[in-house]
Image (cartoon, rainbow, N blue to C red):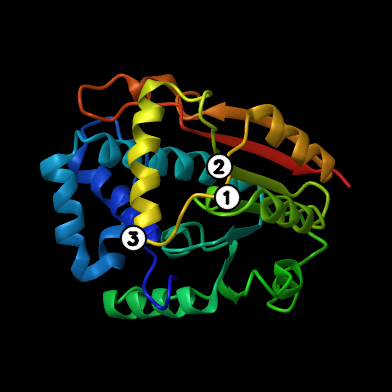
Amino acid sequence: MNDGEPSSTALSSAAARAAHLVADGTPKVFEDTLAARLIGGLADEMIGYHRTRGEHIILAGTRAVTTVRSRYTEARITAHGQYVILGAGLDTYGYRGDPGVRVFEVDHPATQEWKKGLLETAGIPVPENVVFVPVDFEAEDPVERLACSGFDLGRPALVGWLGVSFYLTRDTVAKTLGEIARLAPGSELVLDYALPEGMRDAEGDAYAEIAEQVVRDGGEPRRSAFAPDEINALLKDRGFEVGENVSVRDAVPAHLWRRTDALRPFDCFRLVRAAVTS
């Protein structure tokens, strides 16, 4: 939320996941069957942009990034009985995924109230396995809030932290990683991060130039970027063992990029998977 207004980045991410099903051909990278319902009255307009202008680098790029990171992360859930979504926004896994997995949606209280309203309007029930964990990240410890919300600190969990880190300062990213590292050994983190200028490819530069202006104008400026070696070192310093650090292209099977539509991998963001070791 920004000054009481809904998050434009959460809306655009949900719209991109929904639009992938109708604006792109096959093979599908990821199928979020609830995103369009969740954004409700805005769906026609927002998805309509993707239908009519879907080849634009921002629209096609956002569809590529959001679908890849969701597929990559959700593929790890079956190995864990608890799934923590940091900065959950309009994520829909809890409402269409495995009901045997406890899902903890961690976000700002105002954002969660906004999402609850959207869920109610859309007629999407909140399952018993979904727990809302309101956290003021500036003043509260998310791990303590999780423990107070029924999260089992003694069991490993998957933590998805997607579409968030680049809106935070480096210090805040480091602090949050230190908090996540307090989870049980074997817990796993999937994080996406932005590459700095000079490490992106041409399409990544084109995407970043426009996207950074758009989010800045929307009151959600980007505040950090990391080289892969930097994020790996930061994770190791905080007690993680890095499993892999991959590009959007390499995060999903190669056959998904053999396509004739506008969806293309580009190098502006990376995904890193790391495990808590102690």
- The amino acid on which the numbered mark 3 sits, given as a three-letter code, is Leu
Q: CA distance from mark 1 to mark 2?
A: 7 Å
Above or below — where is 238 with respect to 83? above
Return the disc, 3 or 2, that comes first in the chain's sequence. Answer: 3
Residue 187 vs residue 65, the one in the foreground: 65
The residue at 39%/65% (across/down) is 7
Question: Residue furthest toward the left?
Answer: 52
Coordinates of residue 218 in the picture (x, y in percent): 35, 60
Q: Quadrant of residue 153?
A: bottom right
Q: Which residue is mark 2?
A: 192
Residue 219 against residue 228 in the figure, above or below: below
**In the figure, residue 180 lies in which quadrant?**
bottom right
Q: Which type of secondary structure does the marked residue at label 1 adopt?
A: helix
Residue 168 shown left or right of residue 263 in the figure: right
Q: Check disc 1: other Cα within 10 Å, few if <14, some if 14-19, many if 20+.
A: many
Q: CA distance from mark 3 to mark 2?
A: 18 Å
Q: Amino acid at mark 1?
A: Ser
Disc 3 element: helix
Label disc, if present, on residue 165 of the rendered structure: 1
On the image, numbered disc 3 is attached to which residue? 11
Q: Earlier in the sequence, mark 1 or mark 3?
A: 3
| Between marks 1 and 3 in the image, the one whose residue lies nearer the viewer | 1
Callouts 1 and 2 close, C-beta under 8 Å: yes
Q: Say what secondary structure mark 2 lies in.
A: strand
For the N terminus, which image quadrant?
bottom left
Q: Nearer the viewer, residue 213 or 18?
A: 213
- Quick check: marks 1 and 3 in contact, CB under 8 Å? no
Q: Residue at x 54, y 32 (%)?
A: 196
Q: Splitting the image into 4 quarters, where does residue 267 fall?
A: top left
Crowding around mark 3 (Cα neighbors within 10 Å: few <14, some 14 to 19, many 20+) is some
